[in-house]
Image (cartoon, rainbow, N blue to C red):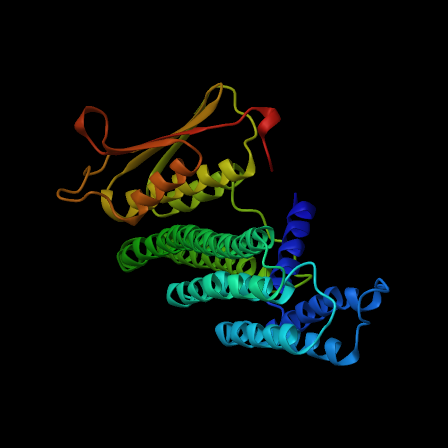
Amino acid sequence: MRESGGYARERWNRCRALGTANPLVVDIGVALLVQAAMTMPFVVPRPADLPPATWPAYGLTTLTVIPLVWRRRAPVAVLLAVLAASALYKLALEGPGQPLPYTGLVIVYTIAALSPPAKRLATTILLLAAIPASVGLNTRSARELTFSFFVFAAAYVFGRLTDARRRANRIEAEQAAARERARIAREMHDILSHAVSLMIVQAEAGPVAVRTAPERAEAAFDAISEAGRDAMVQLRRMLGVLREGDEPGGAPREPQPGLAGLPGLLDRIRASGLDVVYGTTGAARPLPDTIGATVFRIVQEALTNTVKHAAARTVSVRLTYGEGDVCVEVVDDGRGPRSGSGGGHGLVGIRERAAAHGGTAVTGQGPDGRGFEVRVRVPVPSVAGVTR
């Protein structure tokens, strides 16, 4: 999975570099490509009954191409320059014709893709007058008129489709960034809220323990230190993941905490003085890494809320392994839901984590009207669909 992820990230970096290439270099390349296409009639042998291609004609053809270098910065001015040079070519010189109006198509596409509605409307009106005039200077045939309108309309449509795709990609990127910010906010909240809550509880109990049971005071300070170190480790891990996309060849990202980290989490909670009862129901089995991390964070946030708000003595944590899901149940014997509170960021985060996997979360008063409970169901994909 890491190799495929690194390959996808490398591909994305290459695509991003291509998309952010110097626009002037791209435009020069486009102009050279158009120049090569317009050179073909000058190098292909002409019938004997036609006048030979001349260098002045070729030079004037080149003048219709050069303005394309500035097509992004002044597209309408470039269009006017191209039309003027093309008209001069038709009126002043007898040169080989072109199978397609390459320069005009390129600049119409550019205007359709990059310009605001007012400039696009002005371009449309200008073309409605310029195309019949150009046909009148050439064959004066309905066939050429119809073909000219078709190819310029196609160039305009392709430009609008490019703009629509660019806008869609921008919206998708913004939505992805918003989802990533929300994910990082949840992780930061869970890490810091859990660690700080434990440190506050231990720090408040420390002075009392110093006077009454010095050995417990030492344990409280050890618990504060352990909570702080654990928070720092997890924060460094998250910051390393954030930096990984910008640092080629960076260290592989460390795994998120999962079910294997639950015993250590429960021990830290027990060190705060809360009696934690843990058990499982059903056939315990390994879970995909993403679901294991979600279960860990849900249990962590539920226990953090218990420590911060419940004034409980006992909390029960139970995992139930179903045939196609895993259920998490955290129930304490504390004061129950706070009146007038719909749940803070932690409970919202629990619901979001469950919903991200297609699961559900229910929070509220515990059994028999006592305490507070968190019940979460997370679907677990079949073995064939598990990705790690």
Q: Position of residue 145 (x, y in %)?
A: 56, 55
In terms of image quadrants, where is residue 237? Answer: bottom right
**Residue 329 shows in this picture:** no
Residue 56 location (% of width, % of height) = 74, 81
Q: Quadrant of residue 32?
A: bottom right
Could you tell me residue 309's position as x and y percent?
Answer: 24, 46
Number of numbered callouts drawn: 0
Image quarter of the N terminus: top right
Q: Nearer the viewer, residue 252 or 63?
A: 63
Horizontal side of 89 relative to 185 (left or right) equals right
User: In terms of depth relative to the viewer, which is nearer, 257 or 270?
Assistant: 257
Residue at left offset 67%, top offset 63%: 248
| Farthest residue, direction front | 49
What is the residue that sits farthest to the left in this orientation? Answer: 340
Q: Nearer the viewer, residue 309 or 77?
A: 77
Name which residue lies at 63% across and 71% down: 27
Q: Quadrant of the C terminus?
A: top right
* Quadrant of the rendered image containing residue 329: top left
Is residue 293 in view from this perspective? yes
Task: Give the x, y percent position of residue 284.
Answer: 52, 24
- 265 vs 305, nearest the viewer: 305
- Image position of 366 (left or right of 148): left
Answer with left or right where residue 326 lies relative to residue 371.
right
Vertical placement of 221 versus 355: above or below?
Answer: below
